[in-house]
Amino acid sequence: MIRSSRFVPGLLMAAAMMAVPVIAPPPVLAADEAVGDAVAERYAALLERDYVYPETGKRYAAALRAGIRAGRYRALSGEALGAAIDADLNAVAPDGHLRLRVPEAASAAPTVPGTAVAGPRPRKPPVEQAGWIAPGIAFVRFNLFPHDAAVTEAAAKFMADHADAKAIIFDIRSHNGGGLDQMDVIFPWLFAEPTRLVTMATRASVDAGGGSPIDGVASLRLVKGDPGMVTREHWALPNGDKRLHKARVYVLTSGASGSAAEHFALAMKHTHRGVLVGAPTAGANHFGRGEELGGGYEAFIPVGRTYDPDTGKDWEGDGIQPDIAVPPADALVRVLTDLGIAPAEAKTLSDAHMPAWPMERRKPRGAR
């Protein structure tokens, strides 16, 4: 269940409530009550108050309120309500994180009478197949960067256990988001000097209200930035162990690599510390928090953006371009052969380390 809200890029976690201005808590709705208008109005109020770009937030709110007045949502529920609200928001301005989350029972309901009801969606393990893929070559797949001490410890242990590697391969082809915790135990091994990675900017009114997603994180430094935003830089802070400073680093990417995965990819690309191999990433840039809208509906409210400190450009919509463009399914073969593994062996190893999860961009709800 998503509650208000600890901010992390693309991952919804629980924490303290936002301060003023106050928006009424989500209504308690009877099971048979039409929820569409109430859900749309609360969503509109949150976007208007907190969306990373204030003018766009107002336009989102106006579009949803126009839909309420037109009666578009009143009789809808579940996926049908999600599709209608998503379509109206995307018609204003696409955002890779704006997607109404419907109650699980509604999302599992059959669309055709008489068909079977789907079970709960399986959860991805955050870390998979960590270890030596070949002599001197370490491999790990991250599917998520959660706010979870056990996963952070596993990431730290992977780096320490493979500190003598000549090359490390980070597979984020099926990585859909998260926060900074795991990154901040990986980066200290890879850099010889303190290194600026990316810049993160939060809407100032959200920050002033006590809801900064990243305030107090040791690897972030406050800097002067755009008006109306509170800006911090993410830095790699070396841990003093030099063994991996000259190791080759590869990052496998796909259209499913989203949000915090893209933060990781941009940090490697911007610093020239890692080589991105695969396909352009998902193009879901904005970080934020989860909110309950009532009736079991939830939404992610983007409150900030992450961008290249040299260009000021983020990756919303476009994704991050790989250094070596190959189909995602072929990315590991390409890296292993570059590292001297024979093609036949590289193909066998790649097949054994293929993600079980999709490696394509998520389509808008209802798209074929």
Image (cartoon, rainbow, N blue to C red):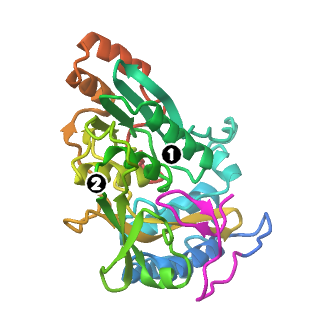
Residue pictured at 39% horizontal, 21% vertical: 133
Q: Which residue is more in the foreground, 126 or 43?
A: 126
Residue 106 lies, in percent from the top left, at 67, 52
Residue 361 visible, this orientation: no
- Disc 2 to disc 1, how far (Cα)? 27 Å
Position of 236 with respect to 323 (left or right) is right
Residue 16 shown in magenta:
yes
Residue lying farthest bottom?
21
Q: Name the residue type under label 1.
A: Leu
Residue 11 lies, in percent from the top left, at 53, 56
Q: Which residues are magenta?
A: 1-26
Residue pictured at 67% horizontal, 83% vertical: 24
Residue placed under numbered mark 2 in the picture: 193
Is the residue 80 above or below the residue 333 in the image? below
Residue placed under numbered mark 1 in the picture: 144
> Is the stretch drawn in magenta largely helix, strand or loop?
loop
Residue 41, by quadrant, is bottom right
Secondary structure beneath dot 1 equals loop
Q: Name the residue type under label 2.
A: Glu
Dot 2, how many residues are within 10 Å of its Cα: few (below 14), some (14-19), or many (20+)? few
Residue 236 lies, in percent from the top left, at 35, 56
Residue pictured at 20% horizontal, 65% vertical: 310
Residue pictured at 23% horizontal, 23% vertical: 339
Residue 49 visible, this orientation: yes
Is the residue 158 above or below the residue 290 in the image? above
Dot 1, how many residues are within 10 Å of its Cα: few (below 14), some (14-19), or many (20+)? many
Residue 222, by quadrant, is bottom left
Quadrant of the rendering where the C terminus is positioned = top left
Residue 268 shown in magenta:
no
Secondary structure beneath dot 2 equals loop
Position of 123 with respect to 183 (left or right) is right
